Amino acid sequence: MTTETPPRHSTTTVVLLHLAHAVDHLFLLIFATTVSSMAPDFGFTQWQDLMPFGVGAFILFGLGSIPAGRLGDLWGRRQMMIVFFVGMGVSALAVSLTQSAWQLALALTLMGAFASIYHPVGIPMLLQTATRPGLAVGLNGLSGNMGVAVAAALTGLLVQVAGWRWAYALPGVAALALGAWFALTSPPETMAPAKRKGGPKVTLTPAQLARLLLVMTIASSCGSVIFNVTTNGNAQLLAERFKGLMEDPARLGLLLAALYALASLAQVVVGRLLDRMALKPLYLIMSIAQLPFLLLEANTQGWWFYAFLVGTTIFMFGAVPFTDTMIVRYIEDGMRSRVTGMRLAMSLSVSSFALWVMGPLVKSWGFSSMLWILAGFAALATLAVLGLPKEPKPVT
């Protein structure tokens, strides 16, 4: 293993890596916004009955992280990012052409497999030369969640104007164009990350590291459940809680886009704070604050509901940068893609099961019960974060 330091990324490469995060989240959430429009085309009278056909995307999104992370470390992150862009574009075009629910399930599962590449590959690639990793993670989180916001606004508009198939086709073409731009402007890697040596920012004992990995897995799994269930269910939840006040899908989509855009700013603030202060107390604030907002959401309607939804989403998004910051702080660069992949496989497998049961659960018990269950996950995440080991203050 050599100590060769990779060259700093160009501004173009950094921008494209941020845009890739937006693509990742945008594509996975198109289904959540279009499902009520798609259901009649596939022979379903209720959107809840079509929802389980999308779970394969999230299963592969989690399980695919392990081979994606391994290939990123051992083969190369640049090559894997090219595969990511091309795969997302092709799979989105495939979804737009499906004619049955099972064809849709297959195409969405393929999309999930390609989507699994970004987090274990793109984020370590972005951070491998970052001088302020907390801020870099925060900006990257902002980019990803702007993809969530764009998914809500753009998809609602495209469904209303041109139909749900165009909501997949146009982003698919855009992903292929971004992939070509990335391939042409990002220089080839001279060495696979696993062959380079780059030590962690803070050194822990083996016992502390094992404890950290356990806490990180539990907390990120709970956070993943809350994030994926809410971002996939918010479109239908908002329609229910605004019933009688607002019915237009495009206007509801804009409300969701404004929600995600505002909440995304929390990641930049948290990322900057992570470069300046200890991780544990900040993580505790982000975790515990979600609990009362989720409970208040469960019992309100209209604009009061929207206000509490904003609070939940701000703290939910604010909790996202912590896992990537822990990995860059405690794990050497040559192993970061593999560690990220294993962590994602566990947390996203749990959240995939949660998504699978979301439709039937909401159909039987209603959204209020779902929000109470999510509050339980927020409480469990808080208990896990309490178990984080103490750490020295990172060097700024």
Image (cartoon, rainbow, N blue to C red):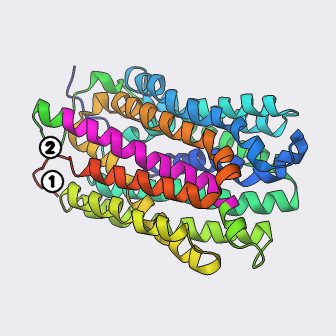
Above or below, 191 relative to 183: above
What is the magenta range? Answer: 210-236
Which residue shows up at 51% across the image and 41% down it? 351
Of the numbered discs 2 and 1, the one sitting upstream in the chain is 2
Above or below, 296 relative to 276: below
Q: Secondary structure at mark 1?
A: loop
From the viewer's side, name the closer residue of 252 and 303: 303
213 magenta-colored? yes
Distance in Å between CA atoms under marks 2 and 1: 7 Å
Mark linked to residue 78: none
Residue 128 visible somewhere in the drawing = no
Crowd rating for badge 1 (residues with CA inside 10 Å; few <14, some 14–19, many 20+): some
Which residue shows up at 77% across the image and 42% down it? 49
Give the residue pinned by disc 1. 394
Give the residue pinned by disc 2. 202
Dividing the picture into quarters, in which one does residue 260 lie? Answer: bottom right
| Residue 30 in picture, x, y percent from top left | 69, 49
Residue 237 visible somewhere in the drawing = yes
Which residue shows up at 42% across the image and 32% down it? 346
For badge 1, the amino acid type reads Pro
